[in-house]
């Protein structure tokens, strides 16, 4: 087993570790959706002196070394830049992570009543074990966009006094047939509907002619709180996530239990490092993207042109408009594709190859390759780049480990690394090892969170 890095810390390091992980837990609580993560990131960036790139452009101003700007894409994707001493065309140091997490989404025609219960029809997002999402408290986050242009924020189930929601499961007394099913079939995707009400509209009590009175009551409550009609579900984005806060895990409080640590443990640590590093020769970048869990597709995923277009704007404002310099900037850059890795779990040792596994409290994790079965879909980083990273981490006193995702023929996973590598830049997967990946509640080590921040700071200074 690799060294447990808790044994290496002095008193000052333990204090910094605690400060960072307390801040991290607060960010997890405030950012349970990609929109909430973007809003929080912008607020933190502005407090650190970052300006909106859009505002700078509209004012007709140029950018110089030391300037700090951010750009936003559809409120679901954000990128921060700190302009370095070297030209952007000489390359950037990029920290990239995703801020979407597996969850359950509300459909566009969702509200219905069945046998005195009112439900929201759903579709799950990303890779989940469906049976893990039943019979536990859930909250509802998102936005309702109205035809008049107004956008109402929704956050129900997180505050004291809020109601919560649930997806019901069959009682064990009647579950003999259910328990004989494969785990993937125990709960059908179409049965992941959210229970939201059971009380009929007040005027309809005792009126046998009234139909769908429970649904009518829900609609009245939505009208009172959000001025929302049933048709407004069509232009709403509502996400169902576990209710509750990030908590210390273990009697020794060495771990963190929370929803969404894949990949917000890398997103927030990248953001912390970006805000901490104020001087560096190369332009630093923190890129937080959406849609990774479903293939990085769409206008807010890494496959979109948002990042490339934003870099083009920066090049134009610092070196003059040049398509060639934009291509050079991307090709000459180095990136940490910061995503979580599977932590070795002795309860499921058969799924891992121990020598090549990441361990909790083992430090920041580097994955030379991801993909599945024969490295399919992987970036597979260059040896020379890895050697340079090893030196940078060693010089900064960062604890790190190299790992792969499970046994060779068992499965695998993907990140945004291969997409950025298409530009010809040096990219490697780097992040924090977690237990319970993609479950409603995931486990990370506070020590690894701390080392990730240290490692990302060191990378930005390379």
Image (tube, grey):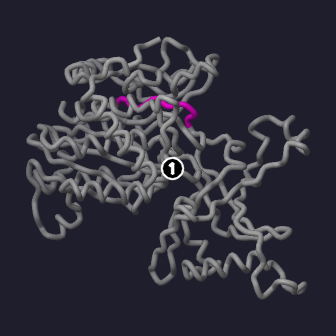
Region of the chain picked out in magenta, as a range: 428-437
Q: Which residue is mark 1?
A: 245
Q: Position of residue 174 (x, y in %)?
A: 91, 45
- 110 horizontally vs 250: left or right: right
Frontmost residue, 391 versus 379:
391
Principal SS element in the magenta part? Answer: strand
Q: Is residue 274 visible?
A: yes
Q: Residue at x 46, y 33 (%)?
A: 253
**Is 430 covered by the magenta stretch?**
yes
Question: 292 above or below 253?
Answer: below
Is residue 425 visible from the viewing direction of this image? no
Query: Residue 177, located in which quarter of the rendered image?
Result: top right
Location of residue 56 by image quarter? bottom left
In this picture, is 240 found above or below 258?
below
Residue placed most toward the observer, 165 or 387: 165
Q: Residue at x 83, y 70 (%)?
A: 116
Question: At which x and y percent is residue 152?
Answer: 48, 74
Q: Percent x, y for residue 377?
A: 49, 31
Residue at horizontal 33 percent and vertical 29 percent from the top: 451
User: Would residue 23 appear left or right of 236 to someone viewing this image?
Assistant: left
Residue 176 locus on image (x, y percent): 91, 39
Binning the other alpha carbons within 10 Å of mark 1 as few (below 14), some (14 to 19) or many (20 upward) gives: some
- Quadrant where the C terminus sits is top left
Question: Which is more toward the observer, 15 or 49?
Answer: 15
Local secondary structure at mark 1: loop
Q: Is residue 279 above or below residue 146?
A: above
- Which residue lies at the image location 33% right of the left edge and 54% below the top edge? 41
- Tell me if residue 202 is in the magenta stretch: no
Total labels drawn: 1
């Amino acid at each position: 087993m690799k060294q447990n890095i808790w044994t290496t810390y002095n008193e000052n390091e333990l204090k910094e570790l605690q400060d960072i992980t307390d801040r991290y837990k607060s960010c997890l609580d405030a950012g349970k959706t990609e929109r909430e993560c973007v809003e929080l990131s912008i607020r933190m960036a502005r407090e650190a002196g970052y300006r909106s790139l859009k505002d700078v452009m509209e004012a007709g101003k140029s950018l110089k070394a030391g300037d700090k700007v951010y750009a936003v894409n559809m409120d679901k994707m954000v990128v921060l830049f700190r302009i370095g001493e070297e030209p952007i065309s000489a390359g950037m140091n990029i920290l990239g992570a995703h801020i979407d997490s597996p969850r359950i989404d509300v459909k566009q025609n969702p509200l219905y009543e069945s046998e005195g219960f009112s439900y929201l029809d759903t579709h799950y997002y990303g890779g989940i074990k469906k049976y893990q999402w039943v019979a536990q408290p859930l909250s509802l986050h998102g936005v309702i966009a109205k035809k008049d242009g107004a956008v109402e924020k929704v956050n129900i189930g997180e505050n004291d006094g809020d109601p919560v929601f649930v997806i019901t499961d069959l009682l064990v007394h009647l579950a003999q047939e259910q328990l004989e099913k494969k785990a993937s079939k125990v709960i059908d995707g179409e049965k992941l509907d959210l229970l939201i009400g059971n009380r009929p509209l007040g005027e309809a009590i005792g009126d046998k002619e009234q139909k769908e009175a429970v649904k009518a009551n829900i609609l009245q409550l939505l009208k009172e709180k959000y001025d929302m009609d049933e048709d407004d579900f069509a232009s709403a984005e509502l996400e169902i996530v576990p209710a509750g806060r990030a908590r210390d895990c273990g009697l020794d409080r060495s771990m963190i239990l929370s929803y969404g640590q894949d990949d917000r443990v890398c997103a927030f640590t990248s953001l912390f490092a970006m805000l901490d590093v104020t001087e560096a020769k190369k332009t630093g970048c923190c890129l937080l993207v959406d849609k990774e869990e479903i293939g990085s597709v769409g206008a807010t995923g890494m496959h979109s042109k948002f990042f490339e277009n934003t870099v083009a704007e920066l090049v134009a404002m610092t070196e003059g408009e040049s398509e060639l310099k934009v291509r050079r900037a991307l090709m000459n850059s180095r990136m940490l594709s910061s995503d979580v890795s599977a932590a070795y779990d002795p309860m499921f040792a058969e799924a891992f190859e121990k020598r090549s596994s990441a361990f909790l409290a083992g430090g920041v994790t580097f994955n030379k390759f991801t993909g599945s079965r024969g490295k399919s879909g992987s970036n597979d980083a260059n040896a020379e780049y890895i050697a340079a990273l090893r030196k940078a981490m060693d010089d900064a006193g960062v604890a790190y480990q190299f790992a792969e995702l499970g046994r060779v023929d068992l499965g695998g996973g993907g990140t945004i690394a291969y997409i950025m590598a298409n530009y010809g830049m040096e990219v490697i997967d780097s992040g924090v090892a977690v237990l319970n990946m993609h479950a409603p509640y995931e486990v990370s080590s506070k020590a690894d969170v701390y080392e990730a921040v240290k490692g990302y700071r060191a990378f930005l200074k390379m």
